Image (cartoon, rainbow, N blue to C red):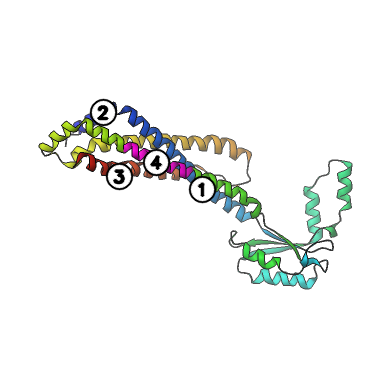
Amino acid sequence: MQLTYVFSELRTGLRRNLSMMVAVIVTMFVSLTLVGLGLLLNAQAEKAEKFWGDRLQITVFLCTDSSPGANCIDGQASAAQRRAVEQVLDTNPQVEKWHFETSRQAYDKWREVYTADDATQRQVVEAIKPSDLAESYWITLEDPRQFEGLKNEVSELPGVGTVRDLREVLQPIYFWIDAFKWGAIVIAGFLLLAAILQVGNTIRLAAFARRKEIGIMRLVGASSLYIQLPFLMEALFAALVGVLLAAGAIGLFLYVVVYRLLRPNSNLVAWIDWGDGMLAIGAITVVGLALTLIPTLLLTRKYLKV
């Protein structure tokens, strides 16, 4: 097989179909970039869930004399009611560990973090006594995502005022991360379909332009691979350029958005890193090559009759 002929045909094909090739490359670039960003958003959602899941605890606040609710009709939680809560915590397999916080401990923590800026606020602070704050249990779970069962079980116990779980606060954040992730992937899917159609159209036009040469090669007994190879090389070229541009866009996103903006200014969550970026780039490389070479192999058999 003469590789000189193959590369000569590749150059000729690129010149003949330059506009179509540019369209394929741009579509591949945009779609693969969106796929990569979708993968990065998915990795970010998993990191955020693990980061907060390892730190967030379910907090069970016991009744005080002023607590509303059906579980608090008898006023402050009794010792027997506390023992009932502790028995549930000791026997529930989802509970990794827990600790009890008294009203005095809660009051001391509150005074450490709360500051009064004016006289009115200081009067309010001074008016609050340790007995006004509820005793509580701080619970760490084996699996942070499996909190509903324990929450429902504890909420029904007499003497329990409220059960707080900050995952409910973070749920809208997870929702929007998932929405952006799947939105990017869906849009990327339509663009990849457009790229496949453009590859098919490019092959059809190229095959029509070379129909005489292809006919002569078939007459002299050229192999199927020999005839298909220039078309495969064109598709490979478009895929590689699209992948390289998408990889550059992903790298730029990580450098500018994550490492220059998010990481220095926020430590509220574990951010994605270069390792996640390399995994995304590896994935889009496989996707980009597969979605150009496989259709090219199939379509060349159809249009070239080899």
Please name the amino acid that badge 3 sits on: Ile
Please name the amino acid that badge 4 sits on: Leu
Earlier in the chain: of badge 4 and badge 2, it is: 2
Earlier in the chain: of badge 1 and badge 2, it is: 2
Read off the magenta span: 184-199
Q: Is residue 197 magenta?
A: yes
Q: Quick one: 190 or 71, which is closer to the camera?
A: 190
Q: Distance from label 1 to label 2 (Cα)?
A: 40 Å
Q: Viewer-nearest of labels 3 and 4?
A: 4
Residue lying at 46% horizontally and 35% vertically, measured from the top left: 249
Mark 1 Cα within 10 Å, few/some/many (few <14, many 20+)? many
Residue, disc 2? 11
Q: Viewer-nearest of labels 3 and 1?
A: 3
- The numbered disc on residue 298 is none
Residue lying at 25% horizontally and 32% vertically, measured from the top left: 206
Q: Viewer-nearest of labels 4 and 1?
A: 4
Q: Is residue 93 left or right of residue 222?
A: right
Earlier in the chain: of badge 3 and badge 1, it is: 1
Residue lying at 32% horizontally and 37% vertically, measured from the top left: 199
Residue, disc 1? 43
Residue 178, image x and y in percent? 54, 48
Q: Quick one: 135 or 150, which is closer to the camera?
A: 150
Please name the amino acid that badge 2 sits on: Arg
Q: Distance from label 3 to label 4 (Cα)?
A: 13 Å
